[in-house]
Amino acid sequence: MNTPTTADIVIIGGGVMGASAAYHLAKRGLKDIVLLEKEDFFGTGATGRCAGGVRYQFSTEINVKLSIESLPMIERFKDEIGQDVNYRQCGYLLVATDEKDATTFQHNVTLQNNLGVPTKLLNGDEVRECLPLMNFEDAISGTFNPKDGIVDPNGVVAGYVSAAQKMGVKAFTQMGVTGIRVNGDEVEAVETTQGLIETRSVLNAAGPWAGQIGEMAGVQIPIVPIRRQMFTTNPLKEIPEDFPFVIDFAQSLYFHREGDGLLIGMSNQEEKPGFNQNIDEEFEFVNLEAAVERMPLLERASRASHWAGLYEVTPDAHPIFGGSSVKGFTICAGFSGHGFMHGPVAGKLISEYILDGKFSTLDVSMLDLARFEEQRLIKEYYLV
Ligand SMILES: Cc1cc2nc3c(=O)[nH]c(=O)nc-3n(C[C@H](O)[C@H](O)[C@H](O)COP(=O)(O)OP(=O)(O)OC[C@H]3O[C@@H](n4cnc5c(N)ncnc54)[C@H](O)[C@@H]3O)c2cc1C
């Protein structure tokens, strides 16, 4: 396919946000949509490197509401989009080992229950009963929601891209955006590695790279890339089929079943912003030691694979939805390490904003870019 010379909209970034937005815009009848991805394949940015966790458990009302809209879309994905995404509802079990977290968990369970999410508060003994393979003598409490789980991120991206293509979306890989032309205060064209595309509308869905794309248009977007990494183990016959997604909250250490083994990750709180996606071997060792401490059987496990990716972090760990000071330059990015699960509804919401100038499915207008300057930050506590 030749590079188009004009488009009604150019979407920058072929991760879950760009793919979902392309699909939802096309479904609403927008023609002449161009989706651009700089890498060889769609979904090789944060989306393809993520842990695939999906949860209703958050500490802010807006994040719980995003999950309430988005997770059922994943449940219906095969029927609507025609692609199996393997939604395994194993539940998330968040474990608190310090008093402050335990108190916050209580408030958060009340918030979630009030919004209709059936999260249960467990005491320390109940946590230990649920996790007989783990050392959680210090657990004070835990929270469990059986509808949380794990989904295949590549399936979601591939499903949206191919459904969008069937509706006429022109989707390109190996086409990086190198510049954005702005005339006065209005978008005029997108410069790519394959030529110029004239357009009045650009969607910045570039995840960890969204700040760079903003700079091209002269818009400051406070999204910083922060490296996170994880590894998987060889098959471990002791891990039951229904092993939950366990988060040792104080250590940002997590475990979930992956194939017949485990996927294990831990967030390095000392990590500095940057685009480096190489494994930090030293920190991997820290992660491994912490994991063995919690689950001694891992002493006998071997590593099957490991990789690193980038969180796309905003100052309040909530995403940015909406327009900017440049007319036609819209943003859907900055999901701060938990955006895969919100990708389905995020694409729908941003399509509503682009086509109707307002959000109908859920009011996310408070998550605009202006909130950072106007000090309207909304802090999320459940960061992993
Ligand atoms: C290690 C790790 C674990 C995670 N675990 C979870 C989890 O369990 N659950 C969850 O919900 N979320 C998780 N996340 C977060 C989640 O991956 C992201 O929030 C989400 O994938 C962001 O999607 P995106 O489409 O905005 O970004 P991306 O998937 O990064 O997509 C942006 C795309 O833009 C492309 N791009 C960038 N610059 C350009 C350019 N100039 N021209 C063209 N294309 C460009 C990139 O190549 C990339 O493919 C995790 C993230 C990481 C790194």
Image (spheres, grey):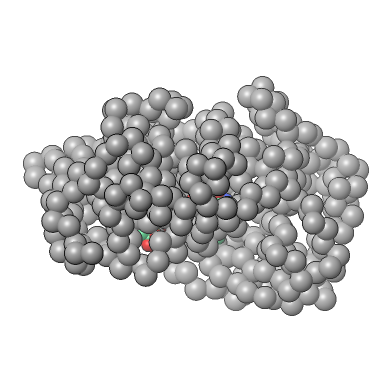
The residue that appears at 19% across and 64% down in the rendered structure is 2
Query: Vertically, is 207 above or below 365?
Result: below
Q: Position of residue 231 (x, y in %)?
A: 64, 69
Q: Residue furthest left?
A: 184
- Residue 94 seen in render: no
Query: Vertically, is 353 above or below 229?
Result: above
Q: Quadrant of the N terminus?
A: bottom left
Q: Position of residue 118 (x, y in %)?
A: 72, 30
The residue that appears at 40% across and 66% down in the rendered structure is 41
Q: Nearer the viewer, residue 144 or 384?
A: 144
Q: Nearer the viewer, residue 351 or 224?
A: 351
Left or right of residue 238, residue 245 in this image: left
Q: Position of residue 205 (x, y in %)?
A: 35, 49
**Which quadrant contains ligand 1?**
bottom left
- Residue 114 seen in render: yes
The residue that appears at 76% across and 71% down in the rendered structure is 235
Q: Quadrant of residue 28?
A: top left
Q: Quadrant of residue 60?
A: top right
Q: Position of residue 359 (x, y in %)?
A: 38, 27
Left or right of residue 27, residue 32 in this image: left
Left or right of residue 168, residue 129 in this image: right
Q: Nearer the viewer, residue 365 or 272?
A: 365
Q: Total label count?
A: 0
The residue that appears at 40% across and 54% down in the rendered structure is 161
Query: Vertically, is 286 above or below 356?
Result: below
